[in-house]
Amino acid sequence: MDHSILNVVTGSSAVVTLFVESQNSSSERRFQKSLTINELKVRLEAIVGIRPSDQQLTLMDAGSKPVCEINDDTRMLGFYPVKDLMTLSVKNTSPSTQINFNDESQVEKYVMDDDQYDRRRDTVRAFKRRHRMGRFADGASEMSLDEDKDLALKIQVGSRCEVALSEGEFRKRGTVRFVGETAFRPGYWVGVEYDEPMGKNDGSVDGTRYFQCAAGHGSFVRPDKVTTGDFPEEDLFGSDLEEM
């Protein structure tokens, strides 16, 4: 046995750090020098997506100059002059079996019609429109104002309602006290008198009164955050009293 090879594989430098590069990926990896090249190729498949039988390995120095071809599957990695921070170039000898993800023409994509995308309520565009962000800033989007208006006209003052400002948030119950445009922000707003003191005002904002309620019970929300229906006032302590 070549004892110099044994020392390289089992000594203090038994692990080497290499840059692995292929058509679709580039990453820094650590490998044991005791790996056979066949075992190395199996591990590389998960990194570069090329089958072991289709891999052509070239060891390159820090200046990207070829050092040697790694072509004997029975040899250990440590047999070759590998050093930390060298590059292991992995080429596909059967390119037809691999998609080049850097070439968009080879990647199958789902394309949604713009009108269909615009009608969805769970998209980034819809979020920006509701919150008047970017090109949907105040006064910039007639479509967003019309959307709010259509929703607002379906809400009747005096209706019981639930309000949830975000998905999964605790739903607050109350009564609709105002529906319409305001002076504090463009668009249509719904004024709600909450059953509990979970609001932000008493029905007035910046000195303008829109409805009357106790301090801390009033709030203004966008129409899409309001659900009207049979939502009776909840007795927060009712269940406790029944169990006493």
Image (tube, grey):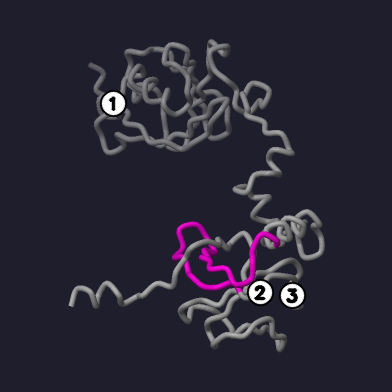
Residue closest to the eye, 132 or 1: 132
Q: Is residue 38 left or right of residue 195?
A: left
Q: State the CA–CA distance, disc 3 to disc 2.
A: 10 Å
- What label sits on residue 178 in the rendered view? 2
Q: Is residue 158 magenta?
A: yes
Which residue position holds label 3?
A: 182
Q: Residue at x 54, y 64 (%)?
A: 165
Q: Is residue 240 above or below residue 230?
A: below
Task: Point out residue 74 in the picture as x, y percentages from the top left corner.
Answer: 32, 13
The residue under the point 26% across, 18% down is: 2
Where is residue 22, by image quadrant? top right
Looking at the picture, how far across and down is residue 229, in whole percent?
52, 61
The N terminus lies in quadrant: top left
Is 229 covered by the magenta stretch? no
Residue 105 drawn at (x, y percent)? 68, 23
Q: Residue at x 24, y 23 (%)?
A: 3
Rounded to the nearest angstrom, the CA distance separating label 1 from label 3 is: 74 Å
